[in-house]
Amino acid sequence: MRKVLLGALAAATSMSVAASSGAYVPLLGDLDRARRAREATLELDVAAARKILDGADTSDTALALETARLLLYEGDCDGAVAVLSRPDLTNRPEAMELGDVSRGCARATAGTLTVRDDERGVVVRLQDDEDRALVPLIVDVALKARENLSKDLGVELPLPMRIDLVRDQFTLAAMTGLPEEAAQTTGTVAVAKWGRVTMISPRATTNGYAWLDTLAHELTHLALTRGTRDKAPLWLQEGVAKRQEVRWREKEPLDDFPPVDVVARVGLDKGLGVELDKIGPSIAMLPSAEQAQVAFAEVASFVRYWAREAGDEALPQLVVRLKAAESSKDFEQAIAEVSAADFQTWVKRWRGHITGLPKDLPAELEPGAMPANVKEIARRIRLGELLQGRGHARAASIERARAHALIPHEASVRCHLAESLLAMGDTQNAAPLVERIDDVYNRFGRWHSLNGLLHPDPSDLDRPFRFGIALDPFEPAVACEEKAAPELPKDAIRAAICEAARRMPR
Amino acid sequence: MRATVAALLAAFCVFLVARAIVLHRRRQDPRRTILETIGPTDPELAAATVRGLGLVEQTTKDATRGSPSLARLHLARLLSRASIERIAERASVAARRWSVAGLVFALVAVFGAAIEQRVVEGLDVLVARNGEAPLPLAYLEDVNIVAKPPEYLHQHGRVIDTFEATSLPRGTMITVHGRPTFPSRTLVLTDGKVEVPFALDGVGGVVARWELGETATLRIAARFGDVRIPQADVQEVTSIPDLAPKVLVEDAPRTVRMLDEPEIVVSYEATDDHGLREVDLVYRSGGREARRVLSRPQGDPTSDRGSHRIVFGGDAFFKRNFLPVEITVEARDNDPIVGPKWGKSAAIVVVPPQVGEPEAIRYEALVRARDALTDLVAMRLVEEAPKGTQSADHVKKEREAQEKALGVVEEALAGTYGGLRFPRRALALARGQLRRLEVALAEEQKAPSAATHQKLVEESEAVLLAIDAAAHSLGTSDTRRVAKRLATVADEAAEATAVAAGQRGSETANGVARLDAAVSVLDGGGKQLLRLGQLGLDLGEIVANGLRRIDRARKANDLFHAELAARDLAARLRNPDPSFAGGGGSGSGTESGAGGSGTGDGDPSSADDAAEAGEQELEDLIREHGDELEDVEQALERAFSQDELDELKDEAKKHAEAIREAIKNLPRRAGEPGSATAAGKQARDLAESMADALEQGRPRDAVQSGKEAMRALEDAKKRGASAETWDLGEQSAGREAERARPGLGEELAWAEEALEKLRKSAAERAKGDLEKSGKREAQMAERARKLGEKGAQGDGSLPEETLDLLDRAEKSMRDAERALAEGDGEAGLEHQQNAQRLLEMARGERNNEENENSQERPESSDGRSMAKKADIPGKDGHKGPDAFRKRVLEGLGGSSDPLLKEAVKRYAEGLLR
C-alpha cells in the first residue's frame, strides 16, 4: 500500500513537471511492483514475475507494460501485442521497442510449427516446418549447454528454454529489434533477447554455418542476462559466450583457429580494434564484418586470459556480484573483488600478454584480408561449378585445381576439387585433399563428410559426419554422409536431416 | 338506380318462384285440379267426381264403409264422362288470350328499344359480369387504324386492314380513328386490361393511340361506370419483340494460354434485328471487369464486323492480372422501348502465365545458352592444342562446336518469352561477348598454335562467365520484380482472409473464394521463383513455407493467424533481399559473420558491371551531347542582332501578309490522305507557319517552313493534274496550288536572302560561343571513341553494330567540331544532330518491360522516399512542354536512317511550333 502511494506520488510529481514543461510524462501506476516484475522477467523467472503481476489493476499502465514484457518472454507474442495496443501504451516511448518486437514476433510466428519437448524442457518454434528434422539436435545441444553454463557460470537456465528458428534476417530483425541493415552488414545469424534464442535456419545460408555452436553461444547470453539481471557489459557477454560456445562438445582442431589472441593483436595493430568497454550496444551493430571479427577476438581473448589468470571461481563470483551492481563503479569493484585487480589493470595486462605473442597469422587470415587473387579464384571456382554442373568432371577438375593452387588452405576449394576427382573415379588424388584438418584454415561441412567417406576413423565412424552436420545440415552430401539417394544414414536423426536436405529445392 | 332496378328484378323473380310453388302445390290437390279442369265445362260432373274421389279415399282407409274396388270403379266411370274436346277447347281459348297479351308486351318492348339505346345499354349493364357487359354494341363506325413503328426503326406508318389480325414491331404506335355511333359515350380502346380513352379529333371523329407492348387483342368499348360495353369487332395484334444482338466471335469458345499465344486477334460479327449502337470488348476476371469500345456504328446498321488485336504484354488489364480472363465481345442494340439490350459472344478464356512464368522461361533460355557455352568451354579445356597437319581438323572441330553453341545462344537471345524479350543491356552484353568469341576463333583459324588455342580457351571462359553474370543479374532482378508482384497477391490473401473472418462485413464466402484464388496465384508464382536462380530459390522456398503457414492456420479455423501469416509473407516479398547477407571474410562462426571464407566474394566476371557502366556512360554522353546541341542552337539564336531582328520583323509583316494573300484560296479542310486537297491544306498550314515565324522574328524557321510549303504545293499541283476528270474538287485544289506557288516562292526567296544576311552578321558574333562548343564537341567525340574502344574487347565487349554506330557518331562529332571551330554554326548543328541520332541508335530501343521498370518509382514500402526526393522545380524548371515536344520528336524520328530521321524531325518541329 505504501509503495502504491509512493508510486502515485512520484507520478503526480512527474505529471506536474510534465505539465509545466510539456515534456515526457512518466508511466503511471505501481512503479515498485512494476520494477520487481521487470527484474524477475529479465532474470527469466517468469513464474515469479507472473506471481507479482497476478491480480494487477487493469488500469495500471506500468504493470500493463510489464505484463506485456512477461508475455513476450513467455512466447505469447499475440498477448503482448494485445496489451500494448492499449491507448495509454500505444505511443509510450517505453513501449515502442516492446511493441515493435511483439508485432514482429506475432507476424513472423503466425501459423508456424512449435515443437515442445515438455519432458526435457525445450520449446522450439520453427518458422519453416521443413526445419523440424533439426529439432532433436537443437534440444540435445541446448540441454548440454545449459548443464555447462550451470557448472561454469553458476547460472541455471530455467525450463522451458525457448528457441526460435527463423527463416531469414528479415525475421530475425523483426523478432528481436536488431536493425536488418546491421544484421546484413555483420552477417548476424542469431540474437539472444526477450528470454529466448532467435536464430536463422542453416538453410538460409549458402554453405550453412556453425549453428549448434551458435545456439550454445546465445544460451550463454541468456544465462548471463539472468545471472547478472542484464547488467553484464558487452565485452563480458560476448567474451564469455565465445568461451562457452564450444564447451558443450568435444574439442575440434579449428576451435581456436585462427587464434583469437593473434587475431586480436593483428586487428588492434591494423586499427580495426575497439576499446573493450566501448563496443557499443552490440557487436552485430559494428560498422563492418572485419571490425566485428576483431571485436569478437578481443573479447574472447580477454575473457579467456582473465578467467585463466583469475581462476575458475572468478567468473561465477563476478556474475553473482554483477547482479547487485547499480553502476559502473560497482562493476569495477566487483571485478576487483573477484580477481584482485580492477578492469583497466586487467586490460593492460591482457594487452601486454597479446603483444608478446608472435604475429604468425597467415596473411589471408588477417582481419579484413582477402586472398591475393580473389577475382581469379572466384573465376576458377565458378567455372569449375558450371562445368561440374554440366557433368564435365575432367574440365571442372582443371579449373578447380587452378583454384586450389591459388588458395591451397581453403577447405571449400579442396572439397570442390575432390568432388570432381571422385566423379572421374580418381579417388587416389581426391583423398589427400580432405585428409588432414591441419591443411585447412576454415571449417567447411563438406570437408568433414568427404573426410568421413575417404578416411573413415574406425574408432568413431560418425564423428566427421557429426561435425559436418553441425556446420552444413542442408547440403545433401553432408547430411546424407556422401550417400547417393535413396540411401540414408543409419542414425535416425541424421536420416531425417538427410531427407530434409534432399527435399530442399536447388 | 342500378340497385333499385336490381331489387325490382329480384322481387319479380321472387314472385315467379312463389307462383311456381303455388302452382305446383295446386297440382298436388286432385279435387282442385278436377274442379279447375272439368268444372268450367260441366260443374255437376265436377262435383260428382269430387264426391267419388272422397268415397275412394274413405273405403281405402275404412273397409267397413264399402268396397274400395267398387268406389274406384265409380270414380273411373265419372271421369270417363268428362268431354275431352270441351276441355281442350277451353284451354285453347285461354292460350290465345295469353299469347295476345305476350305479343302486346313484346311489341311494347321493341318499341321501347327502338326509341331509346340507353334502355338496351342499361339492360346490358344490368347483366354485366366482372365489369364486362355481355351484349356487344356498336359504338364506332368508319374505323381506320394506322400503325407507326417506333422511331428507332426508321419505318413509315401504314394503314392496316381494320380488324384483320396483324403483326407489328413492339413499340408501334397504333392509332384508331372512327366516327362515334352515339355521342356522349366515353369510348376507350382496350386490350381487356389497359384502356386508352378516345379523344375528339375536332372534325367529328374520335381517335385513340395505343403503344404496342406485348401481343394484344384490342377492342373498342364504351365505359359506363365500372362496366364496359365492348364493340363486337376485335383487332388482333401480334407484337414482334426487338431481339438482343447476336455476336459471333471467330473460334470462340476456346481457351488460350498467354504463354503460347502472346497476342490474339478477336474477329467478330455482331448482328441485330433493328440496329446496333455499340460493340465492346469485355474482359472479366475474378471480380474485375473492363470494357473497351470496339465500335460505335452510326446509323443503326443491323450488322457490324471487325477485328481487334490484343497483345497481352502491352495491355494493362493483363499485366496486373494473375487469374484467368474471360474475353467476350458484347453488342448493344438501339432499343429505346425496353432499353438497350446487350448480346454477348461465346468467351475466349485467356489463361495467364503464373506470376513470374515468362521471366522463368526467359531465365531458363539464358541458362540454356550458358550451358551451351559451358559445353564449349569443357570441350576446349580438354582439347589438345593444334599441332602440325592436324590443325585444320582442330580448327574445323572448334568452328563446328562454336557454331553449335552460338546457335543456341542466338536462338535464346532472339526469343520472346510470354511477351518478354531480353533487356537491352543483356542483349548488348551477350552479343558483344559472342563477337569476342568470333574474334578469338578467327585468330586461331588464322594461325593455329598452342598460344592462339590458349587465348581461345581463355576468351571462351571469359565469355561463359560473362553470360553467367548476365544470367545471374537477370535472375536476381527478375526475382525481385516477381517477388514484389507476389507481395501484392499476399496482401490480397491477407485482406481476403480478413473478409473471410467476417472483419469486413458479411461477405465471408466471397472472402474464402478470394483467399483460395490468391493462394493459388501465390503457389504458382512461388514455383516460378524457384526457377529463377539463387535468389529465386531462396524466396520461392519462403513463399512455399508462407503458404503452409496460411494453410495450417486455416485448417485450425484460425483465420486471424492466417491473415497474419499472409501479411508476413507480403512484408517479406516486398523486401526481396537474400535471406542471409553479410559476414565478409573468415567469420566467427557464431552469432555473426557466417559468410564463409570469402573466396567466393570476388565477382567471377565483370561483364555485367562493364555493361552497366558502358550503358551509363553512353546515357551520360547522349544527355550531355543533347545539351550541347541545344547550346549551339541557342548560341545561333542569340547571335542574331536584336536590332536586325526588329528591323526584319517590321519588314516581315508585309511579307507575311503577302504569304497569306498568296495562299488564301488553298483548301481549308484536309481531304483524303494522299489527295491534292490534303497536300494543299498541308501547304497552307506550312505557309501560315512561315508567316508566323517571320512575324515573330524566326527567319530560320520561316525558311524551313517555306521550303516545305513549296514542296507541298508542288505535290498538290501534281495530284490535281492527275485527278479524275469528274473530280472537280481535286482539280481545283491542284490549280490553286499552282496559282499560289509564284507568290510563295517570291516570299521564300526574300526570307532566304534575309536569313543569309542575318547569318553573315551573326556568324561573327557567335564565333566565340561556337568555338567553345566545338572544343566540347571534340571532348565528347573522344568519349565516344573511348566507349567504342572499351567495347571492342574484354568483358565490356559490344556488338559490331553498336561499335559501328559509335564510330559513325564520333565521325559526325568530329565534323561538327570542325564546322563549329570555323564558325559555321548551321553545318555544325547539322553534324551534331546527326551524331545525336547515331548515339541514340547505339543505345538501342528499350523494350516495354524496361520502359515500365524505368517508370517505377524507387519508393520505400512506406512511400516516404517519394516525399523526401521530390524536387521542387525552379522558376525555369517547368519542362512539361519541352518533354512533350521531345517525345513527339522521338516518336516521329523512328526511321532507321539517321538522315531521314533528321528530315522527319524537322517536319515534326514545324508541326509543333
Image (cartoon, rainbow, N blue to C red):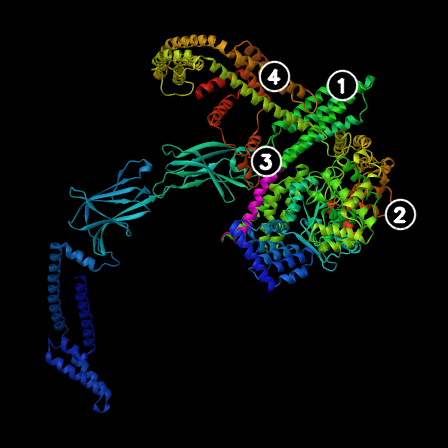
Disc 4 target residue = B779
The answer to whether dots 2 and 3 both sit on one chain is no
Q: Is residue B819 visible?
A: yes
What's the residue at 58%, 20% (across, down)? Answer: B839
Instruction: Look at discs 3 and 4 and give the one toward the viewer.
Output: 4
Magenta-tinted stretch: B480-505
Left or right of residue B210, residue B342 in this image = right
Mark 4 vs mark 2, CA separation in Å: 74 Å
Residue B365 placement (x, y as % from top left): 66, 32
Instruction: Look at discs 2 and 3 and give the one toward the viewer.
Output: 2
Label disc, if present, on residue A458 of the rendered structure: 2
Disc 3 target residue = B259
Instruction: Look at discs 2 and 1 and give the one toward the viewer.
Output: 2
At label 3, which amino acid type do we have? Answer: Leu
Sequence-first disc among 3 and 4:
3
| Chain name for mark 3 | B
Disc 1 target residue = B444
Mark 1 vs mark 4, CA separation in Å: 37 Å
**Element at label 3:** loop
Magenta segment main secondary structure: helix
**Element at label 2:** loop
